[in-house]
Image (spheres, grey):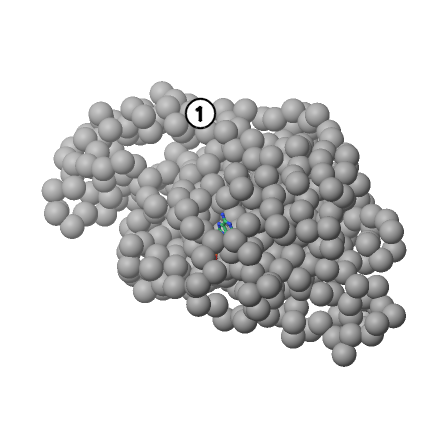
């Protein structure tokens, strides 16, 4: 039973889909325990949905349901507004309205933060409210808290991570079952991992949004996705997964935020990447996410957990609600955010990597020599070459690995490679 002497904090949800229903369910379930620990009553007041007739796993009264996000954002009794609808238009308007009236916003919406972060955080400062966003990166892993608080003593040289549960689930099953991409994506949908706009997941943009948030927390600068190298997993073939395996690697969609020690400049990228099997992130499979952070004080620390899905995400949203409630109860802000830092970016041309390249070429004399000559002309040093017949016997797979080179040299070489090799399809090239 609620204790009438306790402070009451009213919570509103904008969105009662996969994540919203998880938050409603678990907050109801743990309400008494959380209330006791916090010394406040957390009261779920209202939720905005698009279709009130839709079947849901949680039961709300008619008075608790609205179809108007603003009815939640503007409700004078609601102090914590949880934006769990997704998108960057209506969600942005509702979040701004809530912040302008001094409310605290909890959001899982990485696209919104990446596209409008500076404006939203400025609105929070101006209105005297706050934004919490633990669920926006790496699902149930409390990675925001790690960067914002746990590792606050550090400067970060490298952050790399598997940040998209859907892509990791698909790549894992492709590798284990030898099934193509299309056969598996439907299962990811059924499990509630995939964004309403699937391109966000499959083309790497969701990972890029999360990468921008991590880069901002680590370095104080928002990096626009146009300034990152971003590639998704649609073109990763079973051939590539198999060859990577033979070479001792697994292919993961890897986000990287790196600080160049000489210049102090930073870069961010999202690419299918060959991860050595001996590195812990190579063994982060299925819907799990993993993040490795290297700081100058702590060294390297690694975090692994469920990166998507109802319960894992609800866990992070509820952690934010609790932090928000504590701040409201204590009348302050306990969670320092980075200050703006005008650090410069490395250009895409300057990013250096070793590469794996797979070409399907005509199996005839001179092709290998032509490919090797082209790489030499681009000043790319080849580390190893393997050749194996393709299915039609008249073609061959040519697998090259290179020593360190720049992204620009590799892009130039790939653009020209079709000519000498008589390539049958686009080459695969991954760092
Ligand atoms: P869903 O599509 O499952 O849910 C969206 C909810 O928003 C639905 O309840 C929908 O109503 C409601 N909604 C949509 N448009 C409107 C509108 N115009 N007015 C009122 N309500 C509206 O999305 P998820 O729960 O999966 O994701 C929500 C957010 O969480 C997104 O930002 C996503 O990126 C993020 N996220 C998702 C994770 C996941 O695993 N699913 C993990 C981490 C973050 P109705 O139900 O009636 O259709
Ligand atoms: N679609 C996202 C993913 C949800 O698969 O990782 C979690 O952010």
- The residue at the point 33 percent across, 44 percent down is 235
Vertical arrangement, residue 268 with respect to residue 189, above or below? above
Viewer-proximal residue among 358 and 271: 271
| Residue 402 visible in rendering | yes
Residue sticking out furthest to the bottom: 1
| Residue 311 visible in rendering | no
The number of numbered badges drawn on the structure is 1
401 horizontally vs 294: left or right: left
Residue 4: where, in percent of width, then height? 84, 72
310 horizontally vs 337: left or right: left
Residue at the disc numbered 1:
408
SS state under label 1: helix
Residue sticking out furthest to the top: 377
- The residue at the point 73 percent across, 29 percent down is 341
Viewer-proximal residue among 268 and 13: 13
Vertical arrangement, residue 89 with respect to residue 369, above or below? below
Instruction: Indicate yes or no: mark 1 CB to ligand 2 under 8 Å.
Output: no
Residue 328: where, in percent of width, then height? 82, 54
- The residue at the point 79 percent across, 48 percent down is 335
Residue sticking out furthest to the front: 63
Residue 1: where, in percent of width, then height? 76, 79
Residue 379: where, in percent of width, then height? 42, 23
131 horizontally vs 195: left or right: right
Vertical arrangement, residue 173 with respect to residue 114, above or below? below
- The residue at the point 65 percent across, 71 percent down is 28
Viewer-proximal residue among 403 and 171: 171
Mark 1 burial class by Cα count in 10 Å: few <14, some 14-19, many 20+:
some
Viewer-proximal residue among 4 and 398: 4
| Rendering quarter of residue 318 | bottom right
Work out which quarter of the rendered image holds the C terminus and state it. top left
């Amino acid at each position: 039973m609620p204790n009438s002497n306790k402070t009451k904090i009213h919570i509103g949800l904008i969105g009662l889909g996969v994540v919203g229903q998880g938050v409603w369910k678990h907050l109801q379930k743990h309400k008494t325990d959380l209330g006791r620990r916090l010394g406040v009553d957390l009261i779920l007041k209202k939720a905005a949905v698009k279709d009130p007739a839709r079947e849901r796993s949680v039961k709300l009264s008619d008075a608790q349901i609205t179809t108007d996000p603003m009815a939640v954002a503007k409700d004078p009794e609601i102090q914590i507004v949880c934006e769990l609808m997704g998108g960057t238009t209506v969600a942005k308007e509702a979040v701004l309205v809530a912040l302008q009236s001094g409310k605290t916003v909890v959001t899982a919406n990485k696209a919104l933060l990446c596209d409008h972060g500076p404006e939203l955080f400025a609105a929070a400062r101006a209105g005297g409210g706050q934004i919490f966003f633990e669920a926006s990166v790496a699902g149930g892993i409390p990675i925001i808290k790690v960067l914002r608080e746990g590792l606050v003593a550090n400067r970060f040289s490298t952050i790399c991570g598997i940040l998209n549960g859907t892509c990791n689930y698909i790549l894992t099953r492709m590798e284990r079952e030898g099934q193509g991409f299309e056969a598996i994506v439907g299962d990811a949908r059924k499990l509630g991992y995939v964004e309403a706009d699937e391109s966000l997941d499959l083309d790497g943009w969701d990972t890029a949004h999360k990468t921008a948030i991590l880069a901002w927390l680590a370095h104080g600068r928002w990096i626009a996705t146009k300034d990152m190298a971003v590639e998704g997993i649609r073109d990763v073939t079973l051939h590539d997964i198999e060859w990577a395996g033979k070479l001792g690697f697994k292919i993961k969609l890897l986000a990287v935020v790196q600080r160049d020690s000489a210049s102090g400049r930073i870069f961010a990228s999202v690419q299918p990447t060959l991860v050595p099997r001996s590195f812990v992130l190579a063994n982060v499979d299925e819907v799990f996410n993993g993040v490795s952070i290297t700081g100058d004080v702590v060294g390297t620390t690694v975090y692994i957990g469920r990166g998507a899905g109802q319960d894992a995400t609800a866990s992070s949203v509820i952690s934010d609600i609790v932090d928000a409630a504590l701040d409201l109860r204590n009348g302050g802000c306990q969670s320092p955010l980075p200050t703006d830092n005008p650090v410069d970016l490395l250009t895409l041309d300057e990013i250096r990597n070793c590469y794996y390249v797979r070409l399907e070429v005509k199996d005839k004399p001179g092709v290998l020599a032509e490919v090797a000559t082209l790489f030499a002309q681009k000043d790319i040093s080849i580390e190893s070459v393997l050749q194996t017949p393709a299915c039609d016997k008249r073609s061959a797979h040519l697998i090259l690995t290179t020593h360190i080179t720049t992204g620009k040299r590799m892009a130039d070489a790939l653009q020209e490679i079709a000519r000498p090799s008589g390539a049958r399809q686009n080459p695969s090239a991954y760092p």
